[in-house]
Amino acid sequence: MALVPYTETAEMGLQRFHKPLATFSFANHTIQIRQDWKQLGVAAVVWDAAVVLATYLEMGTVELRGCSAVELGAGTGLVGIVAALLGAHVTITDRKVALEFLKSNVQANLPPHIQPKAVVKELTWGQNLGSFSPGEFDLILGADIIYLEETFTDLLQTLEHLCSNHSVVLLACRIRYERDYNFLAMLERQFTGMSLQQFYIIHNGNVKTCQFGNQHFFIAPYLL
Ligand SMILES: C[S@@+](CC[C@H](N)C(=O)[O-])C[C@H]1O[C@@H](n2cnc3c(N)ncnc32)[C@H](O)[C@@H]1O
């Protein structure tokens, strides 16, 4: 028998979550995100899905200038910050407990003239939907938010509440477990009823498109 000591931070791939600062370059800006795994866990580190989604936004496939966007489960807010830098009016949301940390990252990374375009607000899926008008947003963003099976129904209810027939929904996630496929099936069932037009799956680098409604879904596994 051997006892192999290890430190939490020495685990391969997890080291970056323990760095107090994560630095990115998007929209001609250097973005420095403060991280604090010990304080808030998953909500206080930047997940690869957020980098994928921010990269996708920067590609310019979706028109951001002047659009009204919401980010769900924003964590540190990287995606919302990039959307604001690219010209969107963004409501950047998460659970109440994560808001103070989120706000500090948003404020630290937006120049004063862009600050008014970004609002940080509580949105706990399926709960305080009354604070948001139905169909309020042109663009709904979410990075790595499909991971807790017990939240799937609430998350779908939230998407349904926030979407109009003209909304674009961009979700980035790695499809890892059977439950992730379950969510995709639930998403398809829920939105087929609303006659959606397109459903994009970017999986292993290949874009797959399925026609079933007006909203556009983009599912990106993170491949970094
Ligand atoms: C894996 S983290 C992803 C954070 C960030 N989007 C990223 O990709 O870096 C999942 C996020 O979803 C948020 N979340 C989890 N359950 C939620 C709920 N019921 N309502 C709202 N947000 C939730 C967490 O607080 C966390 O910020």
Image: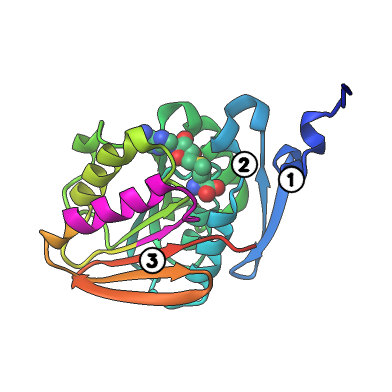
Kindly identify the amino acid type of the residue bearing the numbered disc 2. Answer: Val
- Of the two numbered discs 3 and 2 on the same chain, state the one appearing first in sequence: 2
Relative to 188, is 143 on the left or the right? right
Q: Residues within 10 Å of mark 2 (few under 14, many from 20)?
A: many
Estimate the spatial distance between the alpha carbons at disc 2 and disc 1, rounded to whole Å.
9 Å
**In the rendered image of this protein, does residue 124 appear above or below residue 107?**
above
Mark 3, residue position: 218
Whether residue 86 is visible to the viewer of this picture, yes or no, is yes
The span shown in magenta is 170-190
Disc 3 to disc 1, C-alpha distance = 26 Å
Question: As rendered, which of 202 and 48 lies closer to the eye?
Answer: 202
Q: Which amino acid type is shown beneath numbered disc 3?
A: Phe
Left or right: residue 218 versus residue 162 is right
Query: Could you tell me what secondary structure mostly forms the magenta stretch?
Result: helix
Which of the two residues, 145 or 91, is positioned nearer the viewer here?
145
- Tell me where residue 24 appears, x and y as whole percent: 68, 59
Task: Decide which of tag 3 and tag 1 comes sooner along the chain.
Answer: 1
For label 1, the SS is helix
Asked if marks 2 and 1 touch (Cβ < 8 Å), the reply is yes
Which dot marks residue 45?
Answer: 2
Image marks 3 and 2: residues in contact by CB distance under 8 Å: no
Q: Earlier in the sequence, mark 2 or mark 1?
A: 1
- Badge number at residue 16: 1
- 97 displayed left or right of 135: right
Q: Secondary structure at mark 3?
A: strand
- Quadrant containing the C terminus in the rendered view: bottom right
